[in-house]
Image (cartoon, grey):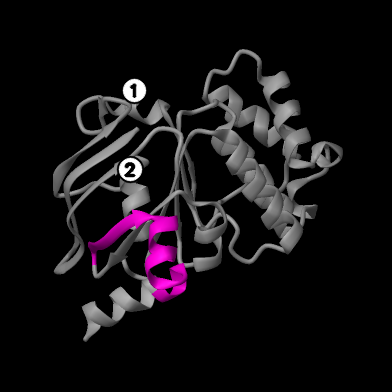
Amino acid sequence: MITITQLTKRYGKILALDNVSLCFDDGKIIAIMGENGAGKSTLLKICAGILPYESGEILIDGFSLHSQSLQARTQLGYLPEMPEIYERITGREFLYYIASLRSIDDAQHRLESLAELMGISDSLDYEIGTYSKGMKQKISVISAIIHNPNNLLFDEPVYGLDPLTSRTIQDFLRKRQSTTIIATHSTQLVEQIADYVYLLMKGRIVASDTVSSFVSTYGSIEQTYFHFKDEIYA
């Protein structure tokens, strides 16, 4: 579980996050929707311990990100929108390196089982530079969850991927049954896999509810989004 209370973040004079409070429940897939520049990626980077913030409190499985940073970040798996991977090594070498950083004892078993689940077992011994975009994304997903974290933070996890790779990752996230937070502007992805959605606009949460409730009220997540956007930007 991740609990965020009155979080504020500035970039100079720009208020990126304005007194944001959220609670991400155990075992749910939660979407944070908003247009480019709304603060989605900033929020995930702060929760991952990558960016500092001005004020507020973040608890990750009860650990304070501010005062218990190591314990808090151990509970997380983070996938940025544009993962950076050294391409002159093989997928297996890269994942073993990540496993060593995480001090994983059963690295071989974890690596091979996850690679099979993601459908890339036959490609582990090729250099990452030869991989397609979809294969690189699958390797990045495995690197984010190889330590079996309780909470996942994924920034646009299926953006620009072919339909088969997108479906593989979506199916994988459904089966994980962990707390999964997805930052996205894809209304289709939200409807397909999310249980709950927060709408983030101009650095503020303007609405939140279950996906089913929003769809029941407004007809679709797309219509929900534009309903609140029209109110905010009117």
Q: Looking at the image, which is closer to me, 18 or 52?
A: 18
Tell me what residue is drawn at x 39 percent, y 58 percent. Answer: 213
Amino acid type indicated by mark 2: Cys
What is the number of the mark on residue 205? none
Q: Looking at the image, which is closer to me, 45 or 150?
A: 150
Amino acid type indicated by mark 1: Gln
Q: Is residue 207 magenta?
A: yes
Residue 231 in the image: above or below residue 40: below
For the N terminus, the image quarter is top left
Q: Is residue 35 visible?
A: no
Q: Magenta region: which residues? A: 203-223
* Res 211 → quadrant: bottom left
Q: Is residue 48 visible?
A: yes
Residue 182 in the image: above or below residue 36: above
For the C terminus, the image quarter is bottom left
**SS of the residue under disc 2:** helix
Q: CA distance from mark 2 to mark 1?
A: 13 Å
Label 1 Cα neighbours within 10 Å, binned few <14 / some 14-19 / many ≥20: some
What residue does disc 1 label? 71
Tell me what residue is drawn at x 63 percent, y 66 percent. Answer: 160
Image x and y of residue 133, in percent: 70, 59
Q: Are marks 2 and 1 in contact (CB under 8 Å)?
A: no
Image x and y of residue 77, in percent: 48, 36
What residue does disc 2 label? 47
Dot 2 or dot 1, earlier in sequence: 2
